[in-house]
Structure formats: structure tokens, C-alpha cells
Image: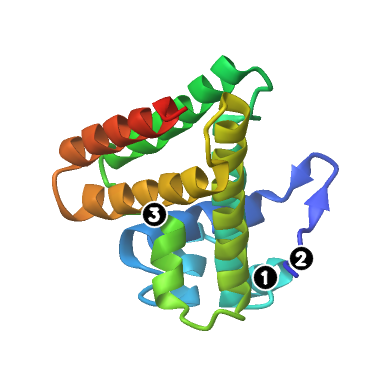
Amino acid sequence: MVENPTGPRGPSPARARLLRTAADLFYAEGVHAVGVDRVITEAGVTRATFYRHFPGKEALVVAYLEAADRAVRAAVGEVPQEPGAAAGWLTGMTLHVADELCRPGFRGCPFINAAAEFPDPTSPVRRVVREHRDWLQGVATEALRRAGHPDPPEGGRRWTALRDGAMVSGYLDDAQAARATLRDAVEELVRAR
């Protein structure tokens, strides 16, 4: 578990700088390509400060992914109960993903990228990736269930596959085309009642 020292006003500024710096570097260059020394230097902290907040690099990677997970959850909110609102919520969550594909510096999904660098499915990094993916598919499935989809579990799996494909395509190919394809495919999925 990652240590989270806090002061009277929340997490320490040094920890926040370390996480922000690590997030920028890990996302832009890859986790294995960026060493702890570089994160420490660019965050402007000492080695002792780093180790006071994180027992090692893997704990920093876990904290980076946990922060990314919290950001996604906060951005999309809760699935509404009402069928039309639930369908609209899933469309909105899809548009949130689609908009990410077209932002400057987009390099794919941080969770997919991290999973590719940590092949051991029992590692703490892969645990965080799995938890995020389970949540994503779970909320998509629940939105489809509330919207009246005939097979919510299958629909949730399809939504996840569409999202994953768009994330990869948005990075490797034409981001605008990936965005449009994702949007159109999910609209079809939501209409399947």
C-alpha cells in the first residue's frame, strides 16, 4: 500500500509534485523509460522526500494510476436511474473518452499502456489496471441495464472493446476518425433495445 502522508490541509505539496511529474513523464514516455531519479529531479524534491512518500517506483506507478482512475470516475459521475438518462450518461461517458482521443499529446490509455509494461497479472500495477477496467465495464453494463438493453453484460463487454479499440486507434491512426467511429458504434449499441 502506498503511504499517503498528509498535513492539516491534505496531501503534502511534495507528494503532489511527485505524482504530477510522474504522471506527465510516465504518460509521455512510458513507465519503464522514466527512472525515479528523473522524477525526483524534475519534481524538485530530494531522494529522502521521495522515499518518505513512496517505498519505491512501483508504488509511485500505482499512485499515478489510482489518481487517473479517480479523475475518470469524477469526470463521468454516477449512472442515473432513469432509462433515458442512463442511456444519455453512457453516451456522455463515451464522448468523454472520444474527446480524450483528440487532445494534444494523446498517447493512448494510461491503463492499457501500463498493463503492456507490467505483464505479471499479479503485480500491484496490474491490480489497479484490473480494478479500473472492471469499474469501466461495470458502469457501462449498469447504464445499459438501466437503459433497457436486451443483454447488458454483452453490451458492457462490447462497449469496453469499442473503447479500447478507439484508444489504440486514436493514438496510432486518425484520432478524429477513431472518435467518430466510437461515437457511432456506441450510439448503435445504446439503441439496441
Side of 69 relative to 193 (left or right): right
Q: Which mark is residue 54?
A: 1
What is the quadrant of the N terminus in the image?
bottom right
Residue type pointed to by label 2? Glu
**At which x and y percent is residue 16?**
61, 51
Kindly check if marks 3 and 1 are in contact, taking CB atoms under 8 A apart as contact. no
| Residue 45 in view (yes/no) | no
Residue type pointed to by label 1? Phe
The residue under the point 56% across, 71% down is 126
| Mark 3 to mark 2 CA distance (whole Å) | 25 Å
Q: Name the residue carrying label 3.
A: 109
| Mark 3 to mark 1 CA distance (whole Å) | 24 Å
The residue under the point 23% across, 37% down is 181
**At which x and y percent is residue 30?**
36, 68
| Residue 157 in view (yes/no) | yes
Q: Nearer the viewer, residue 6 or 93?
A: 93
**At which x and y percent is residue 115?**
45, 70
The mark nearer the N terminus, 2 or 1, is: 2
Would you place residue 130 above or below residue 117 in this image?
above
Residue closest to the far right: 8
Q: Which mark is residue 84?
A: none
Task: Describe the colour scheme in one phrase.
Answer: rainbow
Q: Name the residue carrying label 2.
A: 3
| Mark 2 to mark 1 CA distance (whole Å) | 6 Å
